[in-house]
Image: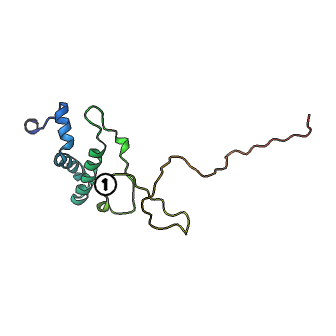
Amino acid sequence: LKYLNEIKTSFDDKTNGESMIQNRDLLTSIASTSLATKLDHDTSRVLSEAIVSSVQCIYPGSDQPIDLNRIEVMPMPRTTNESRFVNGIVLDHGARHPDMPDVLYNCKIMTLNASLEYEKTETQSGFYYSTAE
């Protein structure tokens, strides 16, 4: 414990905390050390690079905490070594009609968190009457 106290690096004030986020080598070694206890060396190296890139991408500054809800891990049917960091939005929707082109350039994409399709209601109700009175 005494040895750890001697070699530790402290990042207490805002200027040191800011430089810690920018220090990619330090963050990568921290992430790699943590991941290497659970994964093999190559996988931990690939994932630690992706983790550091994602944290550096969403870091808002020293006056606000990091919002980890802005990082999403998407399971893909591949090996872990094929994983990579994507700086942006990944859309994997596919064509909805056989006549749609496979490749489009300079297109505009709208992302919407609601369904635009007509959905039938779950309940069935009716109004029955026998006379007009």
Residue type pointed to by label 1: Phe
Q: Quarter of the image containing the C terminus? A: top right
Where is 54 relative to 6, above or below? below
Q: Position of residue 54 (x, y in %)?
A: 30, 48
Where is 63 relative to 103, above or below? above
Q: Residue furthest front?
A: 106
Please state if 20 lies on the left or on the right of 2 as rendered. Answer: right
SS under mark 1: loop
Q: Position of residue 108 (x, y in %)?
A: 46, 54
Res 76 → quadrant: bottom left
Res 41 → quadrant: bottom left
Res 12 → quadrant: top left
Q: Residues within 10 Å of mark 1 (few under 14, many from 20)?
A: some
Q: Residue at x 10, y 35 (%)?
A: 5
Viewer-nearest residue: 19 or 28: 19
Q: How is the image coloured?
A: rainbow
Where is 67 relative to 75, above or below? above
Q: Residue at x 16, y 35 (%)?
A: 16
Q: Residue at x 21, y 51 (%)?
A: 32
Q: Residue at x 91, y 37 (%)?
A: 132
Please state if 3 lies on the left or on the right of 71 as rendered. Answer: left
Viewer-nearest residue: 101 or 21: 101
Q: Which residue is mark 1?
A: 85
Q: Position of residue 38 (x, y in %)?
A: 26, 53
Please state if 47 lies on the left or on the right of 25 as rendered. Answer: right
